[in-house]
Image (cartoon, rainbow, N blue to C red):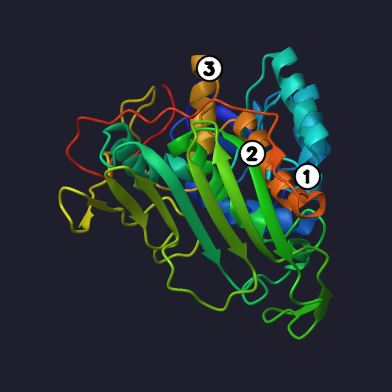
Amino acid sequence: MSDPAKSFRVGLIGTGRISDIYLENCVGFDGLDIVACGSLNMEESRTKAAEYGVPLVEEPEKIIADPNIDAILNLTIPAAHAEISLTALNAGKHVYSEKPFVTDLTDGRRILDLATSKGLCVGNAPDTFLGGRWQTVRKLLDQNAIGEPTGVAAFVPTHGVERHHPNPDFYYAEGGGPLLDLGPYYLAAMVFCLGPIARVAGLSRRTFPERMIENGPRIGEMMAVEVDTHCLSLIEFESGVIGQMMVSFDVWESETPRLEIYGTEGTVCIPDPDPGDGANIFQGDVWLRTRATSRWTMRPRPKAPADWEVVVNTHGLNFDARGAGLAELAAAVKGNREPRASGALGLHLCEVMQGMLDSPGLGRFVDIQSTCKRPDMLPETRETGLNVNWGLPS
């Protein structure tokens, strides 16, 4: 554990499945300590605390009220995100939340306004664009490797989560669905690479009225599907770039590249967003083909960001890991700046996805009212290795 006098102390609320990767990874960030955890299921919380060495287990409201905690890590289900975040901000806590930012745009605006009024930082997943893969793509674009960007295509074909998640109901309830679950990863990467989005259109359908849970203690149980599960979208960016995205829980398999960016002089291709672990899109190959080369070449990743307002830690954690956004938020708090994986970005993505879902009923494009700053790249280290770790300011 870090020196308490220098530590950024975090209370984790929501100890479900997603909490494991945060509890496992965040120990590797110097100066960042998860000092408490809690949820509605206190037995589950006690089990997680014992497994990962979290010193304090409390009910969520006690964690939020604790004056020794600097920030709340909000890992509750999407429907509860806004309530927890607003309560934490009112208690003077910074907030980092899992995606989606909110399920109601009015709540999202309230969160940002409250944070501004109190001088607090709000961050939001996904933070995958902080990883080496997307930093590489952005570097290629900034170096004009494909000329002027003109288009982007993303394809996210899955057959749902009921084969691996023991309690998948909320993925198919209001506030769930493939667009809100998987879309943020790809849309955040697009905004990081191409800037904010101006308008969207979409079509969607609900293929199966029920689905069967295929693992865990509830195997064989049927659950109702309340949301559309196959979504097609058109996207126009403020820059004039145009794009398309398919996100589905209804596709058994596909060989289509998962994301490509097109330019006047070439193409960048991301062939597979989940190399090996199926958990994130931080890492993996980036392929480039240009008019000049006429062949695909794999691009090396930028070196790890060991020199951006942080100290290198010694815990052996690669910086391409979930929890990076929380660490970067802590650095932003110390630097008195907006975090890269910001609440403003999270709200913008939510409005974009809501527009995609509203478009079929409206029969037209939906103009996006919000905007956000295009997140800055992470500075590159002068170190020679690619696995230099990162932590928090000393």
Across and down, in percent, residue 335 comes to 49, 16
Of residue 378 and residue 239, the one placed in the foreground of this image is 239
Q: Nearer the viewer, mark 3 or mark 2?
A: 2
Which label is found at residue 159?
A: none
Could you classify mark 3 by the number of other residues whose Cα lies within 10 Å: few (under 14), some (14-19), or many (20 or more)?
A: few
The disc at residue 199 is 2
In the drawing, what numbered circle is on residue 337? 3
| Residue 52, percent from left and from top | 56, 52
- Mark 1: secondary structure: loop
Task: Identify the image quadrant of residue 276.
Answer: bottom left
Residue 370's image quarter? top right
> Residue at (47%, 54%) from the top-left corner?
153
Mark 2–mark 1 distance (CA, rounded to whole Å): 19 Å
Q: Picture quarter containing residue 51?
A: bottom right
Q: Earlier in the sequence, mark 2 or mark 1?
A: 1
The residue lying toward the viewer, choosing from 32 and 338, is: 338
**Where is mark 1, residue-wise?**
103
Say which quadrant the C terminus sits in. top left
